[in-house]
Image (cartoon, rainbow, N blue to C red):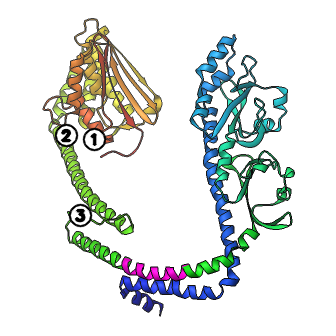
Amino acid sequence: MYARIITLMNNLRLRTKLFLSFGCVVLIPVLIVGLFLTNELRNMAMANALEQITANVDRVKKRTGEMLNIPLDIAYRLSNDSRLEEVANHRYESVYDVVEAYWNYPDFRDFVRLYNEVSSIRLYIDNPTVLNNWEFLQTNESVTQEQWYQTALAQRGLVCWNYIRDNRNGQYYLSLIRKVNFFKARTTGVLVVNVNTKKLNAILNQESFETLIMDENDNIVASNRVDTQDKSLSNIDLATLSATGQGPHDVTIDGKPFKMVIDHWQPGGSLNSLRIISIFSVASIVDEPNRIIFLASIVILSAMIMAILLIYYVSRLLTGRMLHLSKHISKVAAGNLGATLVIDGKDEIGQLARQFNHMVLNINELMSEVQESNRQKNATQLKQNEIKFKMMASQINPHFLFNALESIRMKALVRGQADISQVVRLLGKMMRKNLEVGNGRISLQSELETVNSYLVIQKFRYDDRLTYELLVDPKANPFQIPPLIIQPLVENCVIHGLENRIEGGMVRVEIRLEDSYLKVQVSDNGVGISKTRIQEIRKMLNNNDDYETNNIGMRNIHLRLQLTYGPQFGLTLASQIGFGTQISFAIPLRSDSYV
């Protein structure tokens, strides 16, 4: 039965649905309510007033919370301000030094000037060299004996809200109180931020009901009743409210019934709470029903006539615009992504039209992005295949070469040329490692063995002209890296940095783990590279065009790093004429690859 009703409603036109809805939702309920209006109006008025007073409390709570967020934010900033720690804990030698320090720290004054929610800020600090002013005050016995001061020191940075007397001008303010820990100086202070009482009262003055804000000691912090400001509950006719709990209550004041809502509130997760109380007289609400009954009858009758006319007009307007929207949706469904819908208005249908146009635009952009992404992916794959092909093309069958090197090594060893034999053995080892390199990864330790073999061979060649250092974090040895990305950089430093230097030089390889990265730096103290040449090399590294020479050199390593780990990785080059060259790169300590 229910399904048949839903199907029948779905088959009706929108105009018919609107008239049926009006008849069922408005006409029939109004006739029924009219029979019981006299008896129920009082309850409705009371419920409405209670809703208003609840909304009043919520509104005051929201506005007051927004206002109190300002001193909360100021207290958080100041508690983490290293400059404040320096000013408060510095041991000054003269009055001039103190005045100069106060003048150079204008933050308290700037906050008060920028935010009218705050009337003043002061800091109590145990520093005998400071001078008391409106901002920095030395602690004394009268202050340290105050309950709010002791409570602030006993907490670990929690905020307290208290209605306290400002000993500078004798006035009472709702104040944010917070202990400030100066970790560097190992001292503490107490920060007091006075809330602007006039602005707090101005928030309550916007409310139609009598509204109070009190602290946990029953002090009236703010009120829209002038005769209750700066007083406590014990001084006025609301003393019975002190023991009343959270929520709405029926109370009697001076023998008359009142409705009241109390909200206990801890702004900013503070240690203690504030209470917002809103009160209205029941008599002021009950006197209105008779007048409302007469006015309601006239208004309801007029509204029914206007509603019928309005529904007829609105239904025509809605159906026409929705049909227009439906036609354009059909065009897009047919594949016409260039269709643009123009519907005036800022209502839901107008918003739906704009979202429809935005959706069509996003579809076009997504299609373009997908095409571009596929193009880049294909280009990257093609570049990888070209690099693999060129690396494979550079490999030859090495068996005859290994046999020849072994024969030379044995001959040198037989003739007593141990150093030549060692160099030939290392050369053969290097060549075998290079030719056995595949597309996978090797351990950093294996790569460093190749580097060490190369440097020993070059040491044999250059003798005392070449010295080298390998500074490696032992924890980095098992880390897997692409093969042949460090040895070519060392070779580059030896050939281009030290070969033309008569007195020789040093090559340093430094590898460390830092900030989730493996960082490698190869440096020499050779002849260096000019700024013009540096720019040419950087341009060559970042150029997408292929180079027919030096593919196994720096550009090859740069491309392999970017293809393996992402475009943000690669070689970094720094040099200075006469002081040497540094080549470095970083590898993320993660197991996945970019490609």
* Residue pointed to by mark 2: 387
Q: Position of residue 556 (x, y in %)?
A: 23, 33
Front-most of residues 585 and 338: 338
Q: Which residue lies at the image location 58% right of the left edge and 20% below the top edge?
A: 104
Amino acid at dot 3: Thr
Q: Which tag, 2 or 1, sits closer to the chain's start?
A: 2
Residue 157 position by quadrant: top right
Q: Main secondary structure of the magenta part?
A: helix
Q: Earlier in the sequence, mark 2 or mark 3?
A: 3
Give the residue pinned by disc 1.
563
Which numbered disc, 1 or 3, marks the residue closer to the eye?
3
Q: Amino acid at mark 2?
A: Ile
* Residue 132 pos. (x, y %): 73, 22
Q: Position of residue 41 (x, y in %)?
A: 67, 79
Q: Nearer the viewer, residue 94 or 312?
A: 312
Q: Position of residue 190 (x, y in %)?
A: 73, 32
Q: Is residue 192 above or below residue 269?
A: above
Viewer can see residue 417: no
Left or right of 497 on screen, residue 137: right
Amino acid at dot 1: Leu
Question: Residue drawn at (14%, 29%), measured in percent from left and top?
Answer: 549
Label 3: few (<14), some or many (≥20) within 10 Å? some
Q: Which mark is residue 340?
A: 3
Q: Is residue 239 left or right of residue 518?
A: right
Q: CA distance from mark 2 to mark 1?
A: 11 Å
What residue span does the magenta drawing correspond to?
A: 299-313
Q: Residue at image x 73%, y 43%?
A: 161
- Residue 304 in magenta stretch: yes
Q: Tag 1: Cα neighbours inside 10 Å, few (<14), some, or many (≥20)?
A: some
Discs 2, 1 touching: Cβ within 8 Å = yes
Q: To which quarter of the image does residue 522 belong?
A: top left
| Separation (CA) of disc 2 from disc 3 | 47 Å
